Amino acid sequence: MKISVLGCGRWGSFLAWYSDHIGHEVKLYGRETSKHMQKFLKDRRNEFLILPETIDLTTNLNEAINFADVIIISINSQQLRSFARQLNEIDGVKEKKFILCMKGLESNSGKRLTTVFNEEIQNAKVAVWIGPGHVQDFLCGIPNCMLMASADENLTKELVEIFKSSLIRFYYGSDLIGSEIGAAAKNVIGLAAGMLDGLKYSSIKGALMARGTAELSRLVEALGGNKMTIYGLSHLGDYEATLFSAHSNNRRFGEDFVLKLPFEKLAEGVETVSALMKLSESVNVELPICKTVNEIIHNQKDPKDQLSNLFLRSTKEE
């Protein structure tokens, strides 16, 4: 199978490595101006891995599209709409199968990423690949379970057959709404977890997990999804990797934010929390944890006061 990976950051470069590792022909695309691609073109390595010579590197988007049977997209979720418009101008793009390997929502609309993609490329064959797992662990041979989901059951099963291995065991996702909301929202809960770590309140993470799943299950149900999806791999199943791991960018962002330290890597939860506030208003569902994170990051409220009020000072029925 011929696979193109569009996006050569930490996760995109791993997906190229993984696709090659399980026996596919692989092309990795990055913009000419991408610092990641410039590094790979120089010595085929980044801070996590070395790309084997069997992976072809390209800065030509048309070449990457025309090469592949299946196209993986791993970019900043806020850039997906403009990128999809660019893809839509390439002949034959609607015949390709796409997998979105990002966890986010469009911040200015609250829309799910498959919705954004289908608005720009109508009737696209598109799935999402989400769930727990860190590049560093996979490269050490530590296996994990992940989720493949789409609106087309046959597409989901086909893609699982293409990408399954002893390193990644896939489950089928039948609830696309819950899967996408859950995957995006777990990054916001990760921000909150990092803030608790920074304040030395790590013992409250148990309450954060319990209440986080509860509020987001209500949101998913109000949006027409299955509330139990939140307790699966896309959300609760990803908590260990997001709320506790030293590798988690969102947890580290939250910790560094309350400690007033600079953080230069991508933390998708920062934009996702804005989108969740829009969804919360649209369906009239309260999201106390997400609202608190939003107040701290975007409205400059005091983290200690906000989190203490959230977890320690209210009395109500669970």
Image (spheres, rainbow, N blue to C red):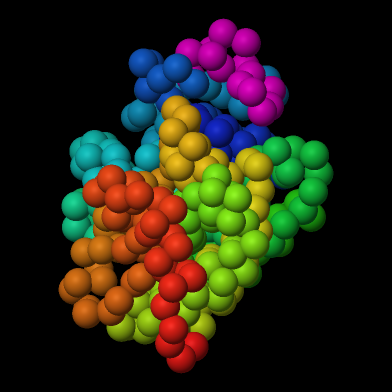
Q: In which image quadrant can residue 305 be found?
A: bottom left
Tell me what residue is drawn at x 53 percent, y 67 percent.
208
- With respect to residue 290, does 223 lie above or below? below
Is residue 272 left or right of 1 when viewed as pictured? left
Measured as percent of width and height from the top left, residue 112 is found at 31, 61
Tell me what residue is drawn at x 26 percent, y 63 percent.
277
Measured as percent of width and height from the top left, residue 39 is found at 54, 14
Tell me which segment is drawn in magenta: 37-50
Q: How many marks on residues?
A: 0
Measured as percent of width and height from the top left, residue 311 is found at 48, 69
Is residue 153 left or right of 291 when viewed as pictured? right
Q: Nearer the viewer, residue 159 or 41?
A: 41
Could you tell me if residue 210 is visible in this image?
yes
Name the quarter where the N terminus is drawn: top right
Q: Is residue 9 magenta?
A: no
Tell me what residue is drawn at x 28 percent, y 45 percent.
300
Tell me what residue is drawn at x 54 percent, y 54 percent.
196
Q: Is residue 44 magenta?
A: yes
Is residue 250 left or right of 282 when viewed as pictured? right
- With respect to residue 127, does 266 lie above or below? above
